[in-house]
Image (cartoon, rainbow, N blue to C red):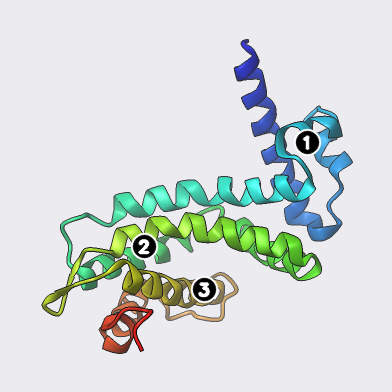
Amino acid sequence: MTRAEAKERNRRALLDAAFQVVSRDGYRARLEEMAERADLTTGAIYSLFGSKNGLVVALVADHLRPYYEEIEQAVPAELELLEAVDAFARHYRRGCDAPDARSGLSLQITLLDMALHDPELGAQLATSVRAQESHLVALFAGRSHHGGVVTPQQAQRLTTALRALFVGLAQGVTLGLAPGADEQYFADTARALVSDLSLVGHDADAS
């Protein structure tokens, strides 16, 4: 095994261990246990990620990356905006039934709790999530909508609104609080949001 391969193996082992420990213990998660689960030392964490917060931020990026890659595949480039949002909504709803949906929700809630206890970590997590969401902005920007083309600023506003909508609905589905929220419900709600021209009808910096 080359040095680069060993480094990547250790990185992967620490991310997997961090997922288990952070999902369970939140801000009380101990570096020592993460390192032990990965069969490494805490020094490896500092070497690869710089700090506990660095490992948590890397964990979030690692968790979100395949999610956004799947969205890009689920939403064809040739669709106009309403059709793209419809496809995105249906894909998001199907994710609520995935085997790892509950563990994902647990991590989501735990990370929010950690961010509230550690503002510095919260700021780092927000930066990481925004960087991942840039994939969604690029996914929606340039699509046709009501005779125009969605600008990057409008796509950013739309992404923020859809994230809030789907996160809330997905939590409701997973917790049994939204029994009627099927794929069609997700799609109808998202299309209604996009149809509001005040959301995508002007640039975010317009006044």
Q: Name the amino acid type tagged 2.
A: Val
Q: Residue at x 66, y 58 (%)?
A: 124
Residue that badge 1 annotates:
45
- Tag 2, which secondary structure? helix
Q: CA distance from mark 1 to mark 2?
A: 32 Å
Q: Residue at x 37, y 74 (%)?
A: 158
- Tag 3, which secondary structure? helix
- Is residue 34 in view? yes
- Residue at the outermost left position: 147
- Tag 1, which secondary structure? helix
Q: Name the amino acid type tagged 3.
A: Val
Assess disc 1: are there few (<14), some (14-19) or many (≥20) residues with their C-alpha within 10 Å of its C-alpha: many
Task: Say the numbered circle drawn on residue 137.
Answer: 2
Task: Say the numbered circle drawn on residue 72.
Answer: none
- Residue at the outermost top position: 1
Q: Choose the circle earlier in sequence order: 3 or 2.
A: 2
Percent across and percent down for residue 19 are: 69, 47
Percent across and percent down for residue 8 are: 62, 26
Q: In the figure, is residue 142 to the left or right of 10? A: left
Q: Residue at x 66, y 23 (%)?
A: 7
Task: Say the numbered circle drawn on residue 173.
Answer: 3
Q: Quadrant of residue 14?
A: top right
| Relative vertical location of residue 56 with respect to residue 147 in this rendering, above or below | above
Q: Name the amino acid type tagged 1.
A: Ile
**CB atoms at circles 1 and 2 under 8 Å apart?**
no
Q: CA distance from mark 1 to mark 3?
A: 36 Å
Q: In the figure, is residue 19 to the left or right of 92? A: right
In what quadrant of the picture does the N terminus appear?
Answer: top right
Camera-side residue of 93 and 44? 44
In what quadrant of the picture does the C terminus appear?
Answer: bottom left
